[in-house]
Amino acid sequence: MEIVHTPVLLNECLEWLSPVGEPYEKHALMIDSTLGEGGHTFNFLSKYKNLSVIGLDADPVIQAKAKERLSSFGERVHFYNGWFNDFYKNYPSEYNKPDLILFDLGISVFHYEKSQRGFSFRYDESLDMRLSPLSENSASDLVNNLEEEKLADLIYLYGEEKLSRRIAKAIVVARAGGKIESSKALAEIIWNAVPANYRYGSIHPATRTFQALRIAVNSELKRLPQALFDAFQDLNAGGKMGVITFHSLEDRIVKNFFKNLGKQCVCPPEVAVCRCGGKQCAEILTRKPVCPTEQEVKVNSPSRSAKLRVIRKICNATKYHLDGVVGY
């Protein structure tokens, strides 16, 4: 079985989310919210013999790979095929509540290298980018059907691309001559749309546009705030939640939500009577985000922008703890 993805911040996750010494050590349940090929889960189950894991993933193809990889752990691992926000919103009654929760919000190398869904501009593949086959719109649908202004706004908002309007205009001009159906075709349009000095920077000029389309297709940022809230509510008191982010948009959501959970009160100054409960809901264990070592970045370059934030739950939150946590 070929494994193409190396889990990021693995040692750090094993340390910060360790069940050792916790009241739940002998019967700990962890939820891997983004199972992928099962790299984090494999290592957690291997190291912590009393741990059980529920692995969530929206992509049935990559989850099948994880099932094969993790088969030796038997009943210690269970699987859920679907989006993590749906799982936490309607937590299955057959499972105990979790003691540990991990989110790794990065896209697996498998999707870039092996899925053939157009996630990478390096290959000539169908411009799809859907992680779940149940998702309504593909990247091709957005590229070929969105109005120029909306397409430019999408590329700017989700990709933080400063040349979004120039790129959107080039896409609209190109599609007038025929539908844009492949990742290679889109990458070439973007390459030709940007100035020559923009083509040879630290990243390929199509990088941010491809990121924006992937985020939009899979509603990655829209589903995140409520998913974090519901996951926190499902987590047992004293349990720990860790989230790995890879770009500023998702990290801002996690940072602001965790910050709110760590406050005594989140009510705005103009509110005369506290409505949020006036309790600190979580202890922030990582005052600063945990980043990969130079050695990890050297051997696993996708880890270079990763950040891990970890909290310990004290009590349930309220809807007011989502104030200011924007899901775009």
Image: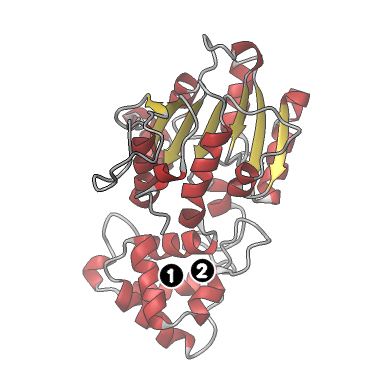
288 relative to 125 in the view: left or right: left
Q: Nearer the viewer, residue 231 or 217?
A: 231
**For mark 2, what is the residue?**
183
Residue 6: % across, % down: 52, 36
Q: Secondary structure at mark 1?
A: helix
Count of marks overlaid on the render: 2
* Contact (Cβ within 8 Å) of mark 1 with mark 2: yes
State left or right for residue 21 relative to residue 87.
left
What crowding class fits label 2: few (fewer than 14 Cα within 10 Å), some (14-19), or many (20 or more)?
A: many
Query: In the displayed structure, does residue 236 sit left or right of residue 171?
Result: right
Q: Residue at x 33, y 36 (%)?
A: 259
Looking at this view, name the residue that lies furthest to the front: 273
Q: Residue at x 42, y 84 (%)?
A: 172
Question: Residue 302 or 252: which is nearer the viewer?
Answer: 252
Q: Residue at 65% x, 14% y: name it.
A: 49
Question: Amino acid type of disc 1?
Answer: Ala
- Viewer can see residue 122: no
x and y, in percent, of residue 239 in the image: 52, 23
Q: Identify the disc placed on residue 187.
A: 1
Looking at the picture, does residue 8 appear above or below residue 248?
Answer: above
Asked whether residue 325 appears in the rendered view, the answer is yes
Q: Is the residue 20 above or below the residue 132 in the image?
A: above
- Mark 1 to mark 2 CA distance (whole Å): 6 Å
Helix or strand or loop: what does disc 2 sit on? Answer: helix
Q: Quadrant of residue 160?
A: bottom left
Dividing the image into 4 quarters, which one contains the C terminus? bottom left
Residue found 24% across the figure and 44% down from its top: 269
User: What amino acid type is highlighted by mark number 2?
Assistant: Ser
* Percent position of residue 208, x then y: 37, 61
Give the vertical position of 43 relative to 305 (above or below): above
Toward the top, the furthest residue is 21
